[in-house]
Amino acid sequence: MKKVQCVHIYHGTQGNGGLYLDEIIKALEEQGISQEVYVSYYFPFNYGKKYFFKYTDLLGGMKKGLFRLFLRYFELIFGLCRTFISLLLRRPSIINYSVISNVYFPEKIFIIALKWFTNSKIVFTCHDVIPFSETQSNIEFLVRRKKSFIRKADYYIVHTLQSRDELIKYYGIISHKIFFYRFPIMDLERLPFIKKGNKNSKNLDFLFIGHLRKEKGLDFLLEAWKLYFVRYKPYGIKLFIAGNAPKGKTWDRINLAKYNIFLCDKYLTDQEYYDLVISANYVVLPYIRGTNSGVISTVLSLGANVLCSDIQMFKQNPLVSETEFFKSNDIHSFVESIHQLAINRNLKDKSKQLKLYRKEFRLELQEVYDCLLAI
């Protein structure tokens, strides 16, 4: 059996998430590194061992419930068992395991078993170093629960300097074990099932899109937009909000419409996400906190511009210029930024910046894997 140098395990590769891993695979192929990929059943490309979440993802539009949670847990165990058997046969030099937010017990057992029964270097790609939390108050508890798992890796990959600093501060990871390369570009037009539209046909002024979680700043956005509307009474300027809302969240749509705020609270398919973004002039990202996100490259690739809060995750992204930020959680800063964009309507073409970004991403990625293979 042919020796595999690197195996990637990432069960969060459904639809748009698959673009993240595909960019990495393609870049390492250019370097001549032999790879195998263990992914979600709904990984959108025609390669990889699709071991995870066939039935859970069919319920993707549902709110979280006990049945879906039980099914996801069972499918995770099943996928990890299949992956473990394959890895015993393959025994790759590197096993790259993507760690998302919260960690499940079967994942801990899986990593311990890999360390016992293979000689592979275990590398964690850390997407959300600090687990998601509705409040900041229980972060230390969540970190303690995750710490024993995180420390089981031999090496770590991060996509922001913020993630590196958090690994050192909260988990006590030694800095020389942490490698960095920037977040891959996630261009929805590369998905094989996307029906392409006209990026120059714009009918949405400002768009907020994605899972409507609290840390993305939706409550702040609603209050800030209302102040903008009252202060400037903008004729015809609208805010469109689209995405999957938390369970139990309700909206006063009639009141929102008074401020030219329109809502579509539903689970969005990748095609619906694509259609909305290419129709938008600006995508508003008023995030309160976050560590990693492919939203910037996705939005810019589809011809929209962004307005971001100045949290570290966005400030460290070279695709965003200083004029595209407002002060996080500062309503007046947001209002003035929106007002200037509404007046000027000057969309920037960032295709050259995206091309340079992808080139630099590939160089950084290849340097990291050269080092990991040489260790």
Image (spheres, grey):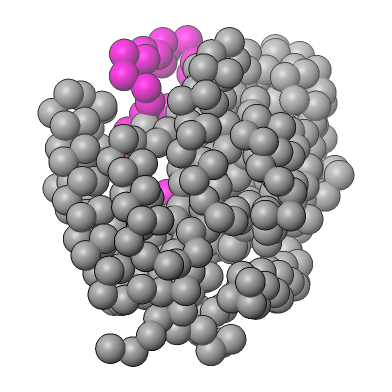
What x and y, as percent, mark residue 184? 59, 62
Q: Is residue 352 above or below residue 177?
A: below
- Between 184 and 368, the one nearer to me in the picture: 368
Q: Is residue 105 above or below residue 280?
A: above
Choose top left, top right, bottom left or bottom right for residue 324.
top right
Q: Work out whether residue 119 can be spotted.
A: yes
Q: Is residue 267 magenta?
A: yes
Residue occupying image coordinates x 54% and y 26%: 143
- Between 42 and 225, the one nearer to me in the picture: 42
Query: Left of 307 or right of it: where is 372?
Result: left
Query: Left of 283 or right of it: where is 175?
Result: right
Residue occupying image coordinates x 38% and y 85%: 3
What x and y, as percent, mark residue 239? 56, 31
Count of numbered circles on the image: 0
Choose top left, top right, bottom left or bottom right for residue 196.
bottom left
Residue occupying image coordinates x 41% and y 10%: 252
What x and y, as percent, mark residue 246? 37, 22
Q: Work out whether residue 287 can be spotted.
A: no
Q: Is residue 109 above or below residue 234?
A: below
Q: Quadrant of the C terminus?
A: bottom right
Query: Left of 39 or right of it: where is 285?
Result: right
Residue occupying image coordinates x 52% and y 58%: 123
Q: Quadrant of the N terminus?
A: bottom left
- Between 22 and 252, the one nearer to me in the picture: 22
Q: Is residue 91 above or below residue 200?
A: below
| Residue at the far right in the pictured view | 322
Q: Report the magenta residues as a range.
A: 245-274
Q: Is residue 251 magenta?
A: yes
